[in-house]
Image: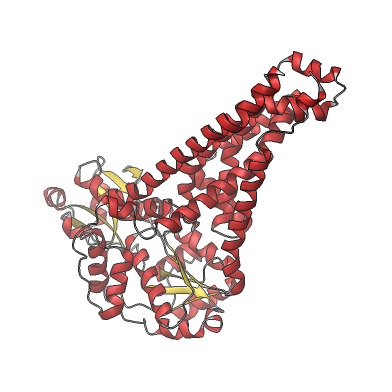
């Protein structure tokens, strides 16, 4: 072997640098609009009514001339929205007096609005513009079963030991939800399982659960012939719908604020139930229902649910694809730049390898939503940054392991030849070991890329967009086609990444590695 045989650097490195430059440019393009003009950011929770109200707030602000209005839908539970509001990631979102008082502020009762605002002032927030309807929590069961058992009140449930409850995750953990209800009615013996709200009605209809938590504006109550049990011990507080916002919002967006104030008292329980029904029962979109209400207050069906093909190739596909690519590529590049050196270190220093691989393996076991919640708390914001960091952590393990194994597999003869040529350790790594190990390293990168394409769908839970936005919305209304409209593009993108890395493997790394070995 001569020096000319190993003069080339790591093959494919220019390609990686070019891709990195493109990704950085994409990130700058995403950030530039925020720097030029601060938008009004609207948040909403992960259930039908909140999606619709978020769209109504967004449409109202835009009609006032505030063109740059962003709706970040389906951000999760009240705690995440509250944190996002305090950090400035959003400016306003719809909530309920009982939730704000008991769940977010930790009060024991719901005080008047003036007192509520005095408490919120410490967080730089305020609440106001009551929307005109109350949407309380309730427990419901099938009408036939309720009639047969003679159950009309929640207190009746304490006499049964065999009932199964399917309760939404938020209701299970809220102070004003299941913990308070269980203590007040003595329901400790009831079998309880966590069930996404959008799936609970179907589970009840199939007989998989007996009791579910509902909202009093849910149109599914009549459709599934449920009996709402009366809260005879008055555990649930008032849940008057209103807007929670940053205190400086009226000064920063005066025109939008003036328009939003006109929403006060404009929504009745019947109107809200009709809008919920148009989405959940008739297949209308959140945006279409909100637009119809804004235009005249009358909500009608769009004429049935859209076909799956129309949903997959909907007008939001380019935006969601760009967001998903940004999440996947940014996190993948970070994991490559960190994971490859860590893998080499683990191979070079066995003492370090004994803790590098187990620690990274342990991080891989942390549930995605728990990791996101931790990163949101640590960074004080929602959106792309915590999502990219979470994906970066999940992509590390396959890259570190494959790098460590691939470098270990380089033959001793090749290293001895490098020493004979007078190459130092760094030159041997750069000119011999990494070119020969690159196919194995690429296998780990390929695995990490495919994993990240799928895992990136969780980013929608914290307002980072991507294909998960459709999946989360589909979960909210139990719309399988809408969920598939998010899952299918994600699967196609994963296949595209697989194909891309196969091309790179055959045309860039494999020929260089084999030619370097033969020489």
Q: Is residue 389 left or right of residue 244?
A: right
Q: Position of residue 483 (x, y in %)?
A: 34, 49
Residue 444 appearing in the image: no
Quarter of the image for residue 426 reads top right
Which quarter shows the N terminus? top right
Q: Nearer the viewer, residue 54 or 421?
A: 421
Residue 54 appearing in the image: yes
Q: Residue at x 51, y 71 (%)?
A: 91
Q: Is residue 94 left or right of residue 296?
A: right
Protein image colouring: secondary structure
Which quarter shows the C terminus? top right
Q: Nearer the viewer, residue 421 or 261?
A: 421
Q: Residue furthest top?
A: 413
Q: Position of residue 54 (x, y in %)?
A: 39, 69
- Tell me: residue 303, above or below residue 397: below
Q: Position of residue 82 (x, y in %)?
A: 51, 64
């Amino acid at each position: 072997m001569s020096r000319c045989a190993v003069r080339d650097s790591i093959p494919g490195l220019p390609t990686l640098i070019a891709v990195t430059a493109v990704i950085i440019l994409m990130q700058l393009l995403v950030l530039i609009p925020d720097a030029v003009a601060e938008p009004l950011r609207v948040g909403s929770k992960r259930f039908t009514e909140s999606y619709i109200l978020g769209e109504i707030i967004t449409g109202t602000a835009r009609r006032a001339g505030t063109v740059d209005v962003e709706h970040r839908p389906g951000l999760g539970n009240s705690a995440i929205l509250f944190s996002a509001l305090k950090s400035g990631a959003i400016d306003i979102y719809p909530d309920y007096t009982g939730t704000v008082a008991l769940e977010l502020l930790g009060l024991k009762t719901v005080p008047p609005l003036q007192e509520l605002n005095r408490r919120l002032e410490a967080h730089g927030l305020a609440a106001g513009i009551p929307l005109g309807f109350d949407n309380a929590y309730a427990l419901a069961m099938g009408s036939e079963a309720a009639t047969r058992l003679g159950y009309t009140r929640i207190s009746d449930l304490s006499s049964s030991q065999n009932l199964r409850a399917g309760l939404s995750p938020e209701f299970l953990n809220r102070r004003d939800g299941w913990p308070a209800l269980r203590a007040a009615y003595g329901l400790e013996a009831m079998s309880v399982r966590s069930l996404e709200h959008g799936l609970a009605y179907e589970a009840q209809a199939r007989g998989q659960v007996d009791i579910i938590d509902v909202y009093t504006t849910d149109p599914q109550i009549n459709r599934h012939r449920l009996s709402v049990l009366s809260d005879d011990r008055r555990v649930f507080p008032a849940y008057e719908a209103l807007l929670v916002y940053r205190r400086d919002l009226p000064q920063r967006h005066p025109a939008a604020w003036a328009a939003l104030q006109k929403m006060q008292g404009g929504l009745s329980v019947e109107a809200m139930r009709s809008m919920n029904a148009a989405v959940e029962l008739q297949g209308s979109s959140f945006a279409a229902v909100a637009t119809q209400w804004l235009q005249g207050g009358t909500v009608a069906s769009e004429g049935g649910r859209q076909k799956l093909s129309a949903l997959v190739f909907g007008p939001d596909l380019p935006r969601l694809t760009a967001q998903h690519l940004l999440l996947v590529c940014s996190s993948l590049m970070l994991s490559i730049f960190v994971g490859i050196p860590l893998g080499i270190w683990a191979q070079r220093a066995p003492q370090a390898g004994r803790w590098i691989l187990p620690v990274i393996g342990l991080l891989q076991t942390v549930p995605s939503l728990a990791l996101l919640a931790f990163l949101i708390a640590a960074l004080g914001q929602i959106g792309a940054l915590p999502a990219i960091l979470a994906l970066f952590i999940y992509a590390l393990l396959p890259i570190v392991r494959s790098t460590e194994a691939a470098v270990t597999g380089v033959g001793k003869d090749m290293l001895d030849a490098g020493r004979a040529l007078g190459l130092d350790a760094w030159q041997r790594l750069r000119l011999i070991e990494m070119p020969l190990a690159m196919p194995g390293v690429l296998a780990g990168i390929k695995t990490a890329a495919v994993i990240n394409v799928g895992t990136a769908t969780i980013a929608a839970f914290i307002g980072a967009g991507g294909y998960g936005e459709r999946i989360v919305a589909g979960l909210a209304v139990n719309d399988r086609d809408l969920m598939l409209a998010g899952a299918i593009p994600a699967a196609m993108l994963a296949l595209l990444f697989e194909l891309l890395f196969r091309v790179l493997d055959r045309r860039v790394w494999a020929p260089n590695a084999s030619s370097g070995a033969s020489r």
